[in-house]
Amino acid sequence: MNFKLLNNTGNNINLLILFFILCCFAVFISPAFLDFDNIQNIIRTVMVLGIIAFGMTMVMILGEIDLSVGSIAAFSCAFGGLFVDSNSSFIVIILTLLAGTFCGFLNGIGVTIIKVPSLIMTLGTMAIIRNVGYIMTKGQAAYPTKLEVYMASAKGYVGIFPIPVIIFIVLSIICAIFIRFSTIGKSFYVVGSNPVASILSGISNNASKIIAFTVCGLCCSIAGLIQSARLGQIDPHMGIGWELTVIAIAVLGGASLYGGKGSIEGTIIATLIIGVINNLLNLLGMSNHSQEVVIAIIIVSMVLIHNFRKKQSS
Amino acid sequence: MKINFKQILKNHFLLFVFILICLVGTFTSEYFFTIINIQNMIRNMAVPGLLALGVSFVFLVSRIDLSVGSLTIFGPILAVSSLAFFGDMFDFKVLVRGNQYANSAAFIVVISLLTGILIGLINGIGVMYGKITSFIMTLAMMKALWGLNYVLTHGHAYYLQIPTYTWMGTLNLFYIPFSTWIYVLMTILASIIMRYTLVGRRIYSIGGDEKTARLAGINVTFWVIIAFIMSGFCASVAGILFSSRLQTVDAPLAVGFELTAIAFAVVGGVSLTGGRGSPYRAFLGTIVMGALFSLFSMWGLNTWHRNIVVGIIIILVVMLDQRKNNFGRI
């Protein structure tokens, strides 16, 4: 365990160096990069995916995968959005979070008790959950602009700090503590790296997996909530194609598809790196769609580098 | 005699499901059993059917290919945009958009097919030489092609109203659409290849047990790459038929086709864990799901309901499959 901790920090230091190099490069290209507004924007834009990446990291530490994240975000917000007319932020927010948690729980049940491989289970729920959202809302958006607390989750400020950034920081601290120091969080690593050993040592693999998927669902609904508050519109079409970027963030942060690896700290730095890359491409004037290509190339090359290193070390 | 009947029922169970769906369709809708609807039904089967056929090769070597959906339209888009770009070098031109011209249909077909083979090759090389999990490699490829589709078309549609090209989508031979002919021919060809040639035997042996196949001296790397190339080729043929039917290619088209393709193959009985399944099984899955989709249209259910059913069916079938033989993971 101690050795693994050390190893993770080594990976994170590499990521930090990459982050600073990218920042220097960005400043060199455009001095506007260091504007307070720009930095705020970077964090605001990428934190939505970053929050989901926390959940995805947990799922990937267990050696599973969740493709339904974008759908869960869209569905849970759409579900909350049905109650916009109640004019109560509290009800809408609670229902959004509950819907997300429930979807995540369903994924967990499917993967553990029904024993469908997570790839297929979440590929299926990706289609099911999104289309249930469409049918529920008839494909129309809801507008939460009257709900003050709801809107404040993306647009409010405490002092000079935007509330979404504070949410991101608080969540990242909670997740990091959960993974590093709680019994359940620690058990994720054991289950992910050796499922047989974990059963023999009395850990319930199924319980760990259900908890990880549920937390992932909750993260998705929080992220979706902030995104819809930011846009002032609860759109059931939200989040198409988020899964790849989220997986890219988690993999960049050191999570392995085979389980047992990854950390929230790595994911936080990876989130910032993806944010800076996106911003850099924006400053260079590249379109949104070419960024998609760049992210795909990044994820493939990260996995390649990872494999190369593993080969070298063994 | 009784055992024989059971065997037939077991092997061709989906054929009976297909007949049942058709009967239900005939009784619940007066338009189901008309020649136009049946033509439409079998024409609409061709594109997802070809994708399912391609995906099933990859499933047979216990990999997964998610890039087929984006690849379907990437072929024609790359062909048209590169021809529009190099158009000045050739003689005759066809209008594809605004003041952009592309060359004859033959070039589009050839370039599309080559693109499919190339993308399959890249997928295969990434999976085998780069040791990237097939699901990540093809997911990344799917997103990259999706982005490239937008970049190449600038978000506008290309019009492909070239007479020699569009007849592929509209022509009927003996009341059966040209697309369906191509699909059935490809399925028969694939069945022959898988059953009687070395390619099939190698692919089945790798799917059965990769380690044993490797120890037996089979070049696993080569044959897995071949499976990916076959998938890419099928996807590009599907793309040609699809775009010739619509007489246009547009970047947002064909989103989610990979899910449909996987559903069709899985319903037919192609196992995700490799080694079990055949082009004929993929064909059975295609006709059952195609008939079901047609029935849904008759009942007035829209794409949303259809996608939910596809999702549920994928999960259910894989669940039953897991129950049947409780081993293996993707």
Image (cartoon, rainbow, N blue to C red):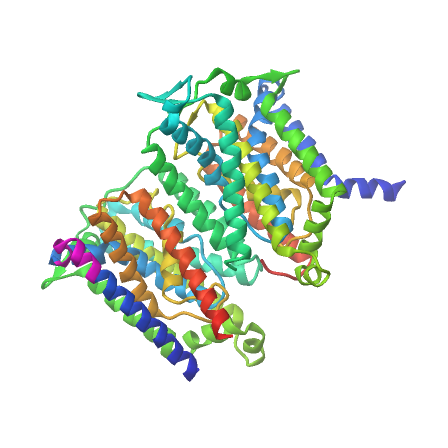
Q: Is residue B156 above or below residue B35?
A: below
Q: Quadrant of the N terminus of chain B?
A: top right
Say whether residue A57 is left or right of residue B15: left
Residue A239 at x, y = what percent? Answer: 35, 48
| Count of numbered tags | 0
Residue B163 at x, y = what percent? Answer: 48, 15
Q: Is residue B138 above or below residue A302?
A: above
Q: Main secondary structure of the magenta part?
A: helix
Q: Nearer the viewer, residue B266 or B275?
A: B275
In the image, the segment drawn in magenta is A24-34
Q: Residue at x 59, y 19 (%)?
A: B30
Q: Residue at x 66, y 29 (%)?
A: B184
Say whether residue B213 is left or right of residue A190: right
Residue A269 at x, y = what percent? Answer: 29, 66
Q: Is residue A33 above or below residue B252?
A: below
Q: Quadrant of the C terminus of chain B?
A: bottom right
Rendering quarter of residue B215: bottom right
Which residue is outermost to the right? B1
Q: Is residue B191 magenta?
A: no
Which residue is outermost to the left? A159
Q: Residue at x 42, y 34 (%)?
A: B78
Which residue is outermost to the front? B89
Can residue B272 be seen by looking at this rendering?
A: no
Can residue B74 be seen by looking at this rendering?
A: yes
Q: Is residue B165 above or below residue B254?
A: above
Residue B210 at x, y = what percent? Answer: 66, 59
